[in-house]
Image (cartoon, grey):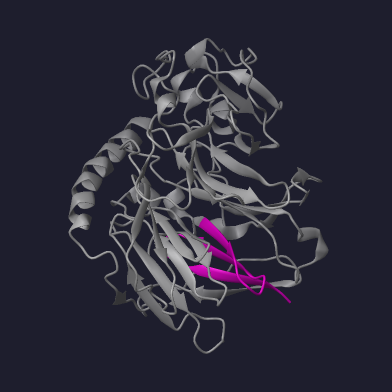
Amino acid sequence: MGMSRSMIGDMQYSLKLLIIFAAAALAACTTASKPMNQVASEPPLPPITVPEGFQATVFADRLGATRHIAVRDNGDVYVAREFRIERKMFGQEAEWGALIALRDENGDGVADRIETFGPTDVDDEVRIHKGYLYFSSDQVVYRMALDDNLVPQTVAEPLAGGFPMTASHGSKTLAFDKVGNFYVNSGTPVNACESKRMSREAPGIDPCPYLERSAGVWRFSDDKLYQDQVRDGVRYFTGTRNIVAMAWNPWADKLYFVMHGRDSIGMLWPDFYTKQDNAELPAEEFHVAEEGDNFGWPYSYFDPRTNQRMQSPEYGGDGKTKAVGDYKDPLIGFPAHWAPNDLLFHTGNNWPAKYAQGAFIVFHGSWNRMPFEQAGFKLVFVPMQDGLVTGDWEVFIADFVGPAPVKNPGKSAYRPTGLAEGPDGSLYITEDKHGRIWKVSSK
Protein backbone atom coordinates (compact mmCIF):
# COMPACT_ATOMS: atom_id res chain seq x y z
CA MET A 1 0.00 0.00 0.00
CA GLY A 2 2.77 2.44 0.93
CA MET A 3 4.90 1.54 -2.08
CA SER A 4 2.08 2.16 -4.52
CA ARG A 5 1.49 5.58 -2.96
CA SER A 6 5.20 6.33 -3.34
CA MET A 7 5.17 5.35 -7.00
CA ILE A 8 2.14 7.56 -7.58
CA GLY A 9 3.97 10.42 -5.89
CA ASP A 10 6.98 9.95 -8.17
CA MET A 11 4.73 10.11 -11.24
CA GLN A 12 3.11 13.27 -9.94
CA TYR A 13 6.56 14.77 -9.32
CA SER A 14 7.61 14.17 -12.93
CA LEU A 15 4.40 15.64 -14.30
CA LYS A 16 4.74 18.72 -12.11
CA LEU A 17 8.23 19.33 -13.47
CA LEU A 18 6.70 19.53 -16.94
CA ILE A 19 3.76 21.74 -16.07
CA ILE A 20 5.74 24.20 -13.93
CA PHE A 21 7.77 25.19 -16.97
CA ALA A 22 4.72 25.12 -19.22
CA ALA A 23 2.82 27.34 -16.81
CA ALA A 24 5.55 29.96 -16.97
CA ALA A 25 4.66 30.48 -20.63
CA LEU A 26 0.99 31.10 -19.85
CA ALA A 27 -0.54 34.39 -18.80
CA ALA A 28 -0.97 34.40 -15.04
CA CYS A 29 -4.53 35.68 -15.26
CA THR A 30 -6.09 33.89 -18.20
CA THR A 31 -9.80 33.55 -17.41
CA ALA A 32 -12.59 31.29 -18.59
CA SER A 33 -16.15 30.74 -17.57
CA LYS A 34 -16.95 27.43 -15.87
CA PRO A 35 -20.54 26.26 -15.47
CA MET A 36 -21.56 25.10 -12.02
CA ASN A 37 -24.79 23.29 -12.82
CA GLN A 38 -24.81 19.56 -12.18
CA VAL A 39 -24.76 17.49 -15.37
CA ALA A 40 -28.09 15.71 -15.80
CA SER A 41 -26.49 12.28 -16.24
CA GLU A 42 -24.58 12.50 -12.96
CA PRO A 43 -26.23 10.99 -9.88
CA PRO A 44 -27.38 13.47 -7.24
CA LEU A 45 -25.01 14.00 -4.34
CA PRO A 46 -26.24 13.33 -0.79
CA PRO A 47 -26.94 16.14 1.68
CA ILE A 48 -24.89 16.72 4.81
CA THR A 49 -26.31 17.03 8.32
CA VAL A 50 -25.56 20.07 10.46
CA PRO A 51 -26.45 20.62 14.13
CA GLU A 52 -29.87 21.91 15.12
CA GLY A 53 -30.12 25.65 14.62
CA PHE A 54 -27.94 25.66 11.49
CA GLN A 55 -28.57 25.18 7.80
CA ALA A 56 -26.24 24.05 5.02
CA THR A 57 -26.85 25.15 1.44
CA VAL A 58 -24.86 24.38 -1.71
CA PHE A 59 -23.09 27.54 -2.85
CA ALA A 60 -21.45 25.94 -5.91
CA ASP A 61 -20.96 22.46 -7.31
CA ARG A 62 -18.87 20.29 -9.66
CA LEU A 63 -15.84 22.58 -9.59
CA GLY A 64 -13.18 19.87 -9.52
CA ALA A 65 -10.48 19.31 -6.90
CA THR A 66 -11.32 22.32 -4.74
CA ARG A 67 -9.02 22.67 -1.76
CA HIS A 68 -8.61 25.83 0.34
CA ILE A 69 -11.02 28.75 0.13
CA ALA A 70 -11.05 32.47 0.96
CA VAL A 71 -13.92 34.96 1.12
CA ARG A 72 -13.55 38.68 0.49
CA ASP A 73 -15.31 41.36 2.55
CA ASN A 74 -17.74 41.94 -0.35
CA GLY A 75 -18.68 38.24 -0.38
CA ASP A 76 -16.65 37.19 -3.42
CA VAL A 77 -15.24 33.70 -3.01
CA TYR A 78 -11.88 32.35 -4.20
CA VAL A 79 -10.94 28.68 -4.30
CA ALA A 80 -7.73 26.83 -5.15
CA ARG A 81 -8.33 23.91 -7.50
CA GLU A 82 -5.44 21.51 -7.12
CA PHE A 83 -3.39 20.14 -9.99
CA ARG A 84 -3.49 16.35 -9.77
CA ILE A 85 -3.03 13.15 -11.71
CA GLU A 86 -5.59 10.36 -11.78
CA ARG A 87 -5.65 8.23 -8.63
CA LYS A 88 -8.43 5.68 -8.82
CA MET A 89 -7.98 4.56 -5.22
CA PHE A 90 -9.11 8.00 -4.09
CA GLY A 91 -11.75 8.49 -6.78
CA GLN A 92 -9.66 11.28 -8.36
CA GLU A 93 -9.51 12.28 -12.00
CA ALA A 94 -6.60 14.09 -13.63
CA GLU A 95 -7.07 17.85 -13.56
CA TRP A 96 -5.17 21.08 -14.15
CA GLY A 97 -4.80 23.45 -11.25
CA ALA A 98 -6.44 26.88 -11.24
CA LEU A 99 -7.88 29.61 -9.09
CA ILE A 100 -11.67 29.86 -9.18
CA ALA A 101 -13.53 33.09 -8.46
CA LEU A 102 -17.23 32.96 -7.57
CA ARG A 103 -19.85 35.66 -7.03
CA ASP A 104 -23.45 35.50 -5.85
CA GLU A 105 -24.87 38.33 -7.96
CA ASN A 106 -28.55 38.10 -6.99
CA GLY A 107 -28.17 37.37 -3.29
CA ASP A 108 -29.86 33.95 -3.29
CA GLY A 109 -26.92 32.17 -1.65
CA VAL A 110 -25.77 30.44 -4.84
CA ALA A 111 -22.82 31.42 -7.04
CA ASP A 112 -24.12 32.88 -10.33
CA ARG A 113 -20.79 33.85 -11.83
CA ILE A 114 -17.80 31.51 -11.86
CA GLU A 115 -14.43 32.28 -13.46
CA THR A 116 -11.19 30.30 -13.56
CA PHE A 117 -7.82 32.02 -13.77
CA GLY A 118 -4.21 31.77 -12.73
CA PRO A 119 -1.41 29.28 -13.44
CA THR A 120 -2.10 25.59 -13.96
CA ASP A 121 0.19 24.37 -11.16
CA VAL A 122 -1.87 25.89 -8.33
CA ASP A 123 -1.92 23.62 -5.30
CA ASP A 124 -3.90 23.75 -2.04
CA GLU A 125 -3.60 27.31 -0.89
CA VAL A 126 -5.53 30.54 -1.33
CA ARG A 127 -5.80 33.30 1.30
CA ILE A 128 -6.72 36.99 1.47
CA HIS A 129 -4.50 39.36 3.43
CA LYS A 130 -4.09 43.16 3.37
CA GLY A 131 -5.92 43.55 0.07
CA TYR A 132 -4.02 40.80 -1.72
CA LEU A 133 -5.03 37.36 -2.91
CA TYR A 134 -2.31 34.89 -1.90
CA PHE A 135 -1.91 31.50 -3.55
CA SER A 136 0.85 28.98 -4.11
CA SER A 137 2.28 26.21 -6.19
CA ASP A 138 4.49 23.55 -4.62
CA GLN A 139 7.55 25.78 -5.02
CA VAL A 140 6.38 29.42 -5.03
CA VAL A 141 4.07 31.66 -3.00
CA TYR A 142 2.38 34.42 -5.06
CA ARG A 143 0.10 37.36 -4.43
CA MET A 144 -2.21 39.47 -6.62
CA ALA A 145 -3.59 42.85 -5.63
CA LEU A 146 -7.37 42.72 -5.41
CA ASP A 147 -9.28 45.37 -7.36
CA ASP A 148 -12.95 46.03 -8.17
CA ASN A 149 -13.16 43.01 -10.48
CA LEU A 150 -14.10 39.49 -9.53
CA VAL A 151 -10.94 38.28 -11.27
CA PRO A 152 -8.13 40.69 -10.37
CA GLN A 153 -6.69 42.45 -13.40
CA THR A 154 -3.27 42.61 -11.78
CA VAL A 155 -0.01 40.74 -12.13
CA ALA A 156 0.81 37.77 -9.91
CA GLU A 157 3.89 38.69 -7.87
CA PRO A 158 6.23 35.99 -6.50
CA LEU A 159 6.78 36.50 -2.78
CA ALA A 160 8.76 33.45 -1.70
CA GLY A 161 10.29 30.47 -3.46
CA GLY A 162 13.29 28.19 -3.59
CA PHE A 163 11.57 25.39 -1.69
CA PRO A 164 12.64 21.80 -2.36
CA MET A 165 10.94 19.99 -5.21
CA THR A 166 9.09 17.03 -3.68
CA ALA A 167 7.13 14.04 -4.94
CA SER A 168 4.47 14.55 -2.26
CA HIS A 169 3.51 16.85 0.62
CA GLY A 170 4.46 19.90 -1.41
CA SER A 171 1.59 22.15 -0.32
CA LYS A 172 2.76 25.62 0.70
CA THR A 173 0.02 26.42 3.20
CA LEU A 174 0.07 29.90 4.71
CA ALA A 175 -0.72 31.91 7.82
CA PHE A 176 -0.24 35.61 8.64
CA ASP A 177 0.64 37.32 11.90
CA LYS A 178 -0.18 40.90 12.93
CA VAL A 179 3.28 42.41 12.44
CA GLY A 180 3.99 41.90 8.74
CA ASN A 181 5.07 38.28 8.50
CA PHE A 182 3.68 35.22 6.79
CA TYR A 183 4.42 31.59 7.53
CA VAL A 184 4.88 28.79 4.99
CA ASN A 185 4.73 25.04 5.49
CA SER A 186 7.46 22.98 3.87
CA GLY A 187 6.37 19.34 4.10
CA THR A 188 8.66 16.36 3.82
CA PRO A 189 8.09 13.76 1.09
CA VAL A 190 9.03 10.79 3.30
CA ASN A 191 7.21 8.84 5.99
CA ALA A 192 9.65 8.61 8.92
CA CYS A 193 13.02 9.47 7.35
CA GLU A 194 13.69 5.76 6.89
CA SER A 195 16.90 4.69 5.14
CA LYS A 196 14.94 2.76 2.51
CA ARG A 197 11.65 4.38 1.66
CA MET A 198 8.54 2.59 2.98
CA SER A 199 10.51 -0.62 3.53
CA ARG A 200 9.95 -3.07 6.35
CA GLU A 201 12.12 -2.44 9.43
CA ALA A 202 14.32 0.10 7.65
CA PRO A 203 16.19 2.17 10.28
CA GLY A 204 15.89 5.93 10.28
CA ILE A 205 18.62 8.23 9.02
CA ASP A 206 20.18 10.10 11.94
CA PRO A 207 20.30 13.03 11.75
CA CYS A 208 17.40 13.25 9.34
CA PRO A 209 18.54 15.34 6.33
CA TYR A 210 14.99 16.42 5.46
CA LEU A 211 14.84 18.60 8.57
CA GLU A 212 17.20 21.11 6.96
CA ARG A 213 14.71 22.50 4.44
CA SER A 214 11.42 20.71 5.09
CA ALA A 215 9.42 19.20 7.98
CA GLY A 216 8.78 22.65 9.40
CA VAL A 217 7.46 26.16 8.89
CA TRP A 218 9.43 29.15 7.59
CA ARG A 219 8.72 32.84 8.24
CA PHE A 220 8.93 35.60 5.59
CA SER A 221 8.13 39.31 5.28
CA ASP A 222 4.76 40.04 3.67
CA ASP A 223 6.01 43.18 1.84
CA LYS A 224 9.11 41.86 0.06
CA LEU A 225 9.10 40.15 -3.33
CA TYR A 226 11.41 37.40 -4.64
CA GLN A 227 12.33 35.99 -1.26
CA ASP A 228 14.20 32.69 -1.12
CA GLN A 229 13.72 30.03 1.54
CA VAL A 230 17.44 29.71 2.27
CA ARG A 231 18.47 33.34 1.85
CA ASP A 232 15.49 35.14 3.39
CA GLY A 233 13.34 32.63 5.25
CA VAL A 234 13.60 32.00 8.98
CA ARG A 235 12.84 28.50 10.17
CA TYR A 236 10.16 29.18 12.77
CA PHE A 237 9.82 25.61 14.05
CA THR A 238 10.75 22.07 13.06
CA GLY A 239 9.70 18.44 13.53
CA THR A 240 6.42 18.38 11.58
CA ARG A 241 5.95 15.85 8.78
CA ASN A 242 3.42 17.95 6.85
CA ILE A 243 0.93 20.70 7.69
CA VAL A 244 -2.10 21.55 5.58
CA ALA A 245 -4.21 23.00 8.45
CA MET A 246 -2.59 26.17 9.83
CA ALA A 247 -3.93 29.52 11.08
CA TRP A 248 -2.98 32.50 13.23
CA ASN A 249 -5.10 32.82 16.38
CA PRO A 250 -5.91 36.54 16.77
CA TRP A 251 -6.69 36.30 20.49
CA ALA A 252 -3.61 34.34 21.53
CA ASP A 253 -1.54 36.11 18.83
CA LYS A 254 0.16 32.81 18.03
CA LEU A 255 0.41 30.27 15.23
CA TYR A 256 -1.66 27.07 15.50
CA PHE A 257 -1.65 24.00 13.29
CA VAL A 258 -2.78 20.38 12.98
CA MET A 259 -0.16 18.00 11.62
CA HIS A 260 -0.47 15.01 9.30
CA GLY A 261 1.21 12.14 11.14
CA ARG A 262 3.22 9.24 9.75
CA ASP A 263 1.76 6.18 8.03
CA SER A 264 2.02 2.38 8.12
CA ILE A 265 3.67 1.88 11.50
CA GLY A 266 2.21 -1.62 11.88
CA MET A 267 2.90 -2.66 8.30
CA LEU A 268 6.55 -1.62 8.54
CA TRP A 269 7.17 -2.85 12.09
CA PRO A 270 4.90 -5.90 12.61
CA ASP A 271 7.03 -7.28 15.47
CA PHE A 272 6.12 -4.26 17.59
CA TYR A 273 2.68 -3.19 16.34
CA THR A 274 -0.57 -4.95 15.45
CA LYS A 275 -2.95 -4.22 12.59
CA GLN A 276 -5.08 -2.34 15.10
CA ASP A 277 -2.06 -0.25 16.09
CA ASN A 278 -1.46 0.44 12.41
CA ALA A 279 -4.96 1.93 12.19
CA GLU A 280 -4.80 3.86 15.47
CA LEU A 281 -1.26 5.30 15.48
CA PRO A 282 -0.08 8.00 15.53
CA ALA A 283 -2.20 11.02 16.50
CA GLU A 284 -2.97 13.92 14.22
CA GLU A 285 -1.52 16.59 16.51
CA PHE A 286 -3.15 19.99 17.22
CA HIS A 287 -0.48 22.43 18.41
CA VAL A 288 0.23 26.02 19.32
CA ALA A 289 3.70 27.02 18.13
CA GLU A 290 6.44 29.25 19.47
CA GLU A 291 9.58 30.17 17.57
CA GLY A 292 12.19 27.46 17.99
CA ASP A 293 9.78 24.65 18.89
CA ASN A 294 10.53 21.05 17.95
CA PHE A 295 7.50 18.77 17.49
CA GLY A 296 9.40 15.51 17.27
CA TRP A 297 9.15 14.15 13.72
CA PRO A 298 10.70 11.76 12.70
CA TYR A 299 12.21 10.67 16.00
CA SER A 300 8.93 10.37 17.89
CA TYR A 301 5.17 10.09 17.51
CA PHE A 302 2.22 10.83 19.80
CA ASP A 303 -0.08 7.99 20.91
CA PRO A 304 -3.66 9.37 21.12
CA ARG A 305 -4.80 6.38 23.19
CA THR A 306 -2.35 6.92 26.06
CA ASN A 307 -1.57 10.62 25.48
CA GLN A 308 2.14 9.85 25.53
CA ARG A 309 4.95 10.74 23.17
CA MET A 310 6.74 7.59 22.04
CA GLN A 311 10.05 6.80 20.38
CA SER A 312 9.69 5.99 16.68
CA PRO A 313 10.64 2.41 15.76
CA GLU A 314 13.02 3.73 13.09
CA TYR A 315 15.00 5.28 15.96
CA GLY A 316 14.98 2.47 18.50
CA GLY A 317 11.36 2.48 19.65
CA ASP A 318 9.33 -0.67 20.19
CA GLY A 319 5.82 0.61 20.89
CA LYS A 320 6.55 0.78 24.62
CA THR A 321 9.49 3.17 24.87
CA LYS A 322 8.74 6.81 25.58
CA ALA A 323 10.38 9.43 23.40
CA VAL A 324 13.92 10.51 24.09
CA GLY A 325 14.13 14.24 23.47
CA ASP A 326 12.52 17.54 24.40
CA TYR A 327 9.51 17.59 22.08
CA LYS A 328 6.31 19.54 22.51
CA ASP A 329 3.10 17.64 23.26
CA PRO A 330 -0.11 18.60 21.43
CA LEU A 331 -3.11 20.44 22.79
CA ILE A 332 -5.16 17.54 21.41
CA GLY A 333 -4.16 14.25 19.83
CA PHE A 334 -6.84 13.54 17.25
CA PRO A 335 -7.37 9.99 15.92
CA ALA A 336 -4.79 8.63 13.51
CA HIS A 337 -4.92 9.14 9.75
CA TRP A 338 -7.91 11.48 9.75
CA ALA A 339 -5.87 13.93 7.60
CA PRO A 340 -6.45 17.48 8.93
CA ASN A 341 -6.73 19.78 5.92
CA ASP A 342 -7.79 23.16 7.26
CA LEU A 343 -8.08 25.13 10.49
CA LEU A 344 -10.26 28.17 11.13
CA PHE A 345 -10.85 30.24 14.27
CA HIS A 346 -14.42 31.53 14.43
CA THR A 347 -14.48 35.34 14.59
CA GLY A 348 -18.14 36.04 13.77
CA ASN A 349 -20.72 37.16 16.31
CA ASN A 350 -23.98 35.82 14.87
CA TRP A 351 -23.51 32.18 15.89
CA PRO A 352 -24.32 30.81 19.36
CA ALA A 353 -21.91 32.05 22.02
CA LYS A 354 -20.27 28.63 22.49
CA TYR A 355 -18.58 28.98 19.10
CA ALA A 356 -16.89 32.32 19.83
CA GLN A 357 -13.10 32.07 19.41
CA GLY A 358 -13.34 28.31 18.88
CA ALA A 359 -11.47 26.27 16.29
CA PHE A 360 -13.02 24.41 13.38
CA ILE A 361 -10.86 21.64 11.90
CA VAL A 362 -11.82 19.80 8.73
CA PHE A 363 -10.54 16.25 8.21
CA HIS A 364 -10.11 14.92 4.69
CA GLY A 365 -10.46 11.28 5.77
CA SER A 366 -8.07 8.35 5.93
CA TRP A 367 -6.79 6.04 3.21
CA ASN A 368 -4.57 3.66 5.19
CA ARG A 369 -6.62 1.97 7.92
CA MET A 370 -7.12 -1.29 6.01
CA PRO A 371 -8.35 -3.90 6.79
CA PHE A 372 -10.57 -1.70 8.96
CA GLU A 373 -13.06 0.94 7.87
CA GLN A 374 -11.65 4.30 6.92
CA ALA A 375 -12.19 7.20 9.33
CA GLY A 376 -12.23 10.96 9.46
CA PHE A 377 -14.31 12.73 6.78
CA LYS A 378 -15.54 15.15 9.47
CA LEU A 379 -15.71 18.74 10.57
CA VAL A 380 -14.97 19.09 14.28
CA PHE A 381 -15.21 22.00 16.68
CA VAL A 382 -12.81 22.73 19.56
CA PRO A 383 -14.08 25.20 22.20
CA MET A 384 -11.39 27.77 22.97
CA GLN A 385 -10.94 31.07 24.79
CA ASP A 386 -7.89 33.31 24.37
CA GLY A 387 -6.08 30.47 22.62
CA LEU A 388 -6.70 27.88 25.35
CA VAL A 389 -8.79 24.75 24.87
CA THR A 390 -11.74 25.01 27.26
CA GLY A 391 -13.56 21.70 26.73
CA ASP A 392 -13.83 18.49 24.77
CA TRP A 393 -13.88 18.66 21.00
CA GLU A 394 -17.08 17.65 19.24
CA VAL A 395 -18.13 16.60 15.76
CA PHE A 396 -19.97 19.39 13.93
CA ILE A 397 -20.57 17.49 10.66
CA ALA A 398 -20.15 13.70 10.64
CA ASP A 399 -21.57 12.44 7.35
CA PHE A 400 -19.21 13.64 4.62
CA VAL A 401 -18.38 9.96 4.23
CA GLY A 402 -21.94 9.23 3.11
CA PRO A 403 -24.72 7.00 4.44
CA ALA A 404 -22.42 4.10 5.37
CA PRO A 405 -18.77 3.55 6.36
CA VAL A 406 -16.26 2.75 3.62
CA LYS A 407 -13.05 0.74 3.39
CA ASN A 408 -11.92 2.51 0.22
CA PRO A 409 -11.67 6.32 0.52
CA GLY A 410 -12.67 6.60 -3.12
CA LYS A 411 -16.11 5.33 -2.12
CA SER A 412 -16.78 8.17 0.32
CA ALA A 413 -19.45 10.68 -0.68
CA TYR A 414 -17.15 13.65 -0.08
CA ARG A 415 -13.62 14.46 1.07
CA PRO A 416 -13.78 17.85 2.86
CA THR A 417 -10.74 20.09 2.47
CA GLY A 418 -11.16 23.82 3.14
CA LEU A 419 -12.77 26.36 5.46
CA ALA A 420 -13.45 30.09 5.30
CA GLU A 421 -15.66 32.57 7.11
CA GLY A 422 -17.85 34.96 5.15
CA PRO A 423 -18.54 38.60 6.07
CA ASP A 424 -21.94 37.54 7.46
CA GLY A 425 -20.33 34.94 9.72
CA SER A 426 -21.29 31.98 7.54
CA LEU A 427 -18.89 29.06 7.30
CA TYR A 428 -17.85 27.95 3.80
CA ILE A 429 -16.66 24.36 3.36
CA THR A 430 -15.03 22.84 0.28
CA GLU A 431 -14.48 19.23 -0.73
CA ASP A 432 -12.23 17.91 -3.47
CA LYS A 433 -13.95 14.80 -4.80
CA HIS A 434 -16.72 16.60 -6.72
CA GLY A 435 -15.89 20.25 -6.11
CA ARG A 436 -18.86 21.16 -3.94
CA ILE A 437 -18.93 24.25 -1.72
CA TRP A 438 -21.38 24.50 1.17
CA LYS A 439 -22.39 27.60 3.06
CA VAL A 440 -23.34 26.87 6.69
CA SER A 441 -25.36 29.56 8.46
CA SER A 442 -26.96 29.97 11.85
CA LYS A 443 -30.76 30.15 11.58
Say which quadrant the N terminus sits in. top left
Say which quadrant the C terminus sits in. bottom right
Residue 143: image location, x then y, percent: 40, 59
Q: Residue at x 32, y 59 (%)?
A: 97
Left or right, 140 with respect to 25, comes to: right
Q: Is residue 434 magenta?
A: yes
Quadrant assignment, res 107:
bottom right
Q: Residue at x 57, y 73 (%)?
A: 73
Q: Nearer the viewer, residue 38 or 380?
A: 380
Name the residue furthest bottom: 106
Q: Which residues are magenta?
A: 417-443
Residue 303: image location, x then y, percent: 64, 27
Name the residue furthest top: 316
- Give the vertical position of 442 relative to 333 (above or below): below
Residue 116: image location, x then y, percent: 34, 71
Left or right, 3 with respect to 52, comes to: left
Residue 155: image location, x then y, percent: 32, 65
Mark count: 0
Q: Nearer the viewer, residue 145 or 398?
A: 145
Name the residue furthest front: 224
Q: Is residue 307 magenta?
A: no
Q: Residue at x 33, y 30 (%)?
A: 3
Task: Report whether residue 396 is seen.
Answer: yes
Quadrant assignment, res 279:
top right
- Give the vertical position of 163 relative to 408 (above or below): above
Left or right, 359 with respect to 104, comes to: right
Q: Residue at x 41, y 61 (%)?
A: 80
- Give the vertical position of 392 relative to 312 (above or below): below
- Give the vertical position of 412 relative to 293 (above or below): below
Task: Report whether residue 365 is seen.
Answer: no
